[in-house]
Amino acid sequence: MLNRYPLWKYLLILIVLLVGVIYALPNLYPADPAVQISSTASGTALDQERLDRLTQALEDEGIDVKQSELDGNSALIRLDEADQQIAARDILDDQLGDAYTVALNLADATPDWLAGLSATPMKLGLDLQGGVHFLLQVDMDAAVQQRLEANASAVRDILRDERIRYRDTEIGDRTITFQFASEEDRNAARDLIADQFPDFDYENEDGSSGAALTMTFTEQAVQALQDYAVNQNLTTIRNRVNELGVSEPLVQRQGPSRIVVELPGVQDTAAAKRIVGATANLEFRLEARPDTPDREVETLNFRNDENRSAELMRDVIVTGDHVSSASRSFDQNNRPQVNINLDGTGGSMMSRATRSNIGRNMAVVFIEHKTRTHTVMEDGEEVEKREAYTERGIISLATIQSALSNRFRITGLDSSSEAADLALLLRSGSLAAPIYFAQERTIGPSLGAQNINQGILSVELGLLLVVLFMLARYKAFGVVANIALGLNLVLLVAAMSMLGATLTLPGIAGIVLTLGMAVDANVLIFERIREEIRAKMPAQQAIHAGFERAFTSIVDANITTLLVAVILFSIGTGPVKGFAVTLSLGILTSMFTAILVSRALINLTIGGRPLKKIWI
Amino acid sequence: MRQLDFMGKRRIAFAVSVLLAVVAIGALALKGLNLGLDFTGGTLVEVRYEQAPALDDLRSQLGDQGFEDAQVQTFGTSNDILVRLQQTFDNDVGQRVVGILDSEANPVDLVRAEFVGAQVGDQLRDQSGMGMLLALAVVMVYVAFRFQYKFALGALISLGHDVVIILGIFALFGLDFDLTVLAAILAVIGYSLNDTIIVYDRIRENIRKSQIDDMAQIFNESINQTLARTMATSGTTLLVLLALFFLGGDMIHNFSIALILGVVAGTFSSVYVAAALLLAIKLQRQDLIPSKKENDEEEELP
């Protein structure tokens, strides 16, 4: 019989819709703006009485408290209005003093049974809700030092290859000094390296201890390095932030040597800081032979065993900068490991070094550039001093069994989360210069309340107009199309929530636009049905033919658009990617609802019955 | 139903298209796009108030004094305010902003004023550009495979036509081109392609079905048959867009302008560029006949 679905199809559709409704539901419970109080000193835990007094104090100031809860050493006060969050924090700060820290927070309001199904609401973007603002300072002195060390190492290589003997290297603020045994050696060295390292000014120094050559980093080169370092860090941080899964972040340069990172809806700022600011990198080095001269040897400790150490060559085979991809996995003993692929250059450097050193030990060194701040008294004032330092530790030392190529894995990591972090850092590239957090603040929405309300209003009105239009044009079938449209919205919201998408105002406009375009499939089908009816086809056949004939058009049109979206997703980053996700999900859900759901509705209501006329 | 003679007027439409495209390219070449804060960077000013101000007041104060695109947000506390301006940084900007905001009742201090870089770096821009080109290439291959290469050519030129015209109008009127507009252009590509394929699909169907060899007549029939659908879909989309345009506020104003232009241009171009071009490059029945078999193995209805 025409226009009947077997039962399983109805059930399938029902199941999909049910899942959609469940995962879309948390969006009806937006996160509450909240203030979190935690005690910094022990023995000052909050009690219920104190908390009640605090909430009373807030209410006295006209701040509406929704709920307050005590959880061990900390308390969470949920508020009604996001505008009052900052004011509430200021009041609490005054009341509580130094023994407590008061921080802004977004408290989940998803009911437990939904949270149990790991259904979470979409986050709101920087424009609608604000987020955290990090100001990162690029440590230029450290960047210069790193560059000098790298150049010194390269110069040493050249001198060794050319058999020019040097005694010592010394790295100063902006200078590298090489000590030579004789003037001839020095002059030969200068001729050799001056062309290859044009970023330096060269100067001969003759002292009592022999001939020396001082290379000074030029001012231009420092400038260029600064630009390079900041831009490279920008790119790396963008990659990392995108890997964090926070869509619609903001990463931009501010001033000559700082970077702003703003993340929407981030709750765990500590985790975000760890990834954004991490300066971890890897180095692969050979273990020193007993007869290696001292100046080429560096003794390093193992990371997981302070008492163990090994003597390594100063020269590095390959650094983490040559990693093209990295992922975490587990070995047969379920210990975490990181699989590494090197790029072309890195691969050939690695195979050249390992081929000629089979039987020697190779170490993987984990490097982290850190800064510590300490306050010193200067002219009677407390001044914060920052000191950059580097931590190097061996994570594994293993014998080279055969020549390594560009693929291998490293073990010896403490935990699986450390392995995952390391893989992420290697993938997203290392920072060209160390950075530290100069400032961390919460930031309010970049759009005014009025602007947001206007946007939401226009979106609602747009949707209403589409619904009315479909009703006016297709009457009873318009009702079907509108139900399908509603379900499409539910499915789209569900899919975006599952992917952890972030909602911005243009994003909302995009969703509504997708809906406006999504009725296209129904329009195509209904117009086709009308056409067939005009051609005097009986009603049931016309419905059947309408769906069938429109199908190829719908598929062709949607697949082409889907292709565009998928490619934009795989190549684009940041906002382009986010848009591609909305677009492709919209296409898929709209095809499902417009073809399957609306057909099911029609089949269910009028399918298989003798019809004289249909109201379309 | 009355048949409109679309193909008969194709020379006039062609002239209009060429004229628009030339003006658009000229505007792009001479004036260039007015890139927004996302692409160019601008100035960031942090100020501190004695008492917490109302943000909407600050926005209107700044707007009245020529900083229409100022972004104002609280920064840490309600007294600290961050202002982002789409203006090249110079040393006076900070003082000028403070001058506008300062008042007897609520004094303002300048904390800092600095330039901020683009949110879209060069790398990101190049990558996205490559992505677009690749996407277009894949789509062309798909259309050539499902239809025929002449259709692919038509679709490509019609897409280019729409995008160039939107960009041109943005350049001509100096409208801000930011990331939301970029997203809108991507949406237009999707929309216009959709429209073109629907028309093509009907053309293909009619060429296979009909006995006559007059391509112009077949095209006319096809376009007339899909006209009701085109109008309905463009209609619903435009309804949404007009709502966004008139009520949506600043943030989605340019986004909706780009899309309105795109929907209009896309609808026009799917008839007059994509379809009419097939006449110009002499599409014949033979181009589609060898693939006649394919008719039988078209996807089944689910």
Image (tube, coloured by chain):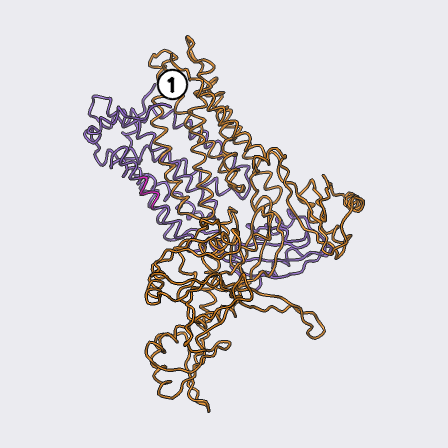
Q: Nearer the viewer, residue A448 or A251?
A: A251
Quarter of the N terminus of chain A within the rendering:
top left
Q: Residues within 10 Å of mark 1 (few under 14, many from 20)?
A: many
Residue A204 sits above or below residue A116 on the image: below
Q: Which residues are magenta?
A: B134-139
Q: Which image quarter holds the C terminus of chain A?
A: top left
**Residue A603, how many percent across, how many down?**
44, 16
The image shows residue A554 at horizontal and vertical percentages of: 37, 28
Chain holding disc 1: A
Q: Which residue is mark 1?
A: A529
Please give the name of the residue rendered at 40% of the width and 49% of the height, measured from the top-left corner.
B128
Image position of A353 with respect to B48: above or below: below
Q: Is residue B136 magenta?
A: yes
Q: Is residue A552 above or below residue B269?
A: above
Q: Is residue B67 left or right of residue A364?
A: right
In this view of the protein, which residue sits in the foreground, B66 or A291? A291
Locate residue A594: give its quadrant: top left
Pinpoint residue B149: horizontal percent, then vertical percent: 24, 37
Residue at the bottom extreme of this rendering: A208
Q: Main secondary structure of the magenta part?
A: helix
Left or right, A441 with reference to B88: right
Look at the image and give the colour of chain A.
orange
Total number of numbered discs in the rendering: 1
Q: Nearer the viewer, residue B147 or B293?
A: B293
- Is A333 in the magenta? no
Chain B as rendered: colour:
purple
User: Does the rendering let one see residue A255?
Assistant: no
Q: Please tell me whether residue A328 is drawn above or below residue B298 in the rendered image.
A: below
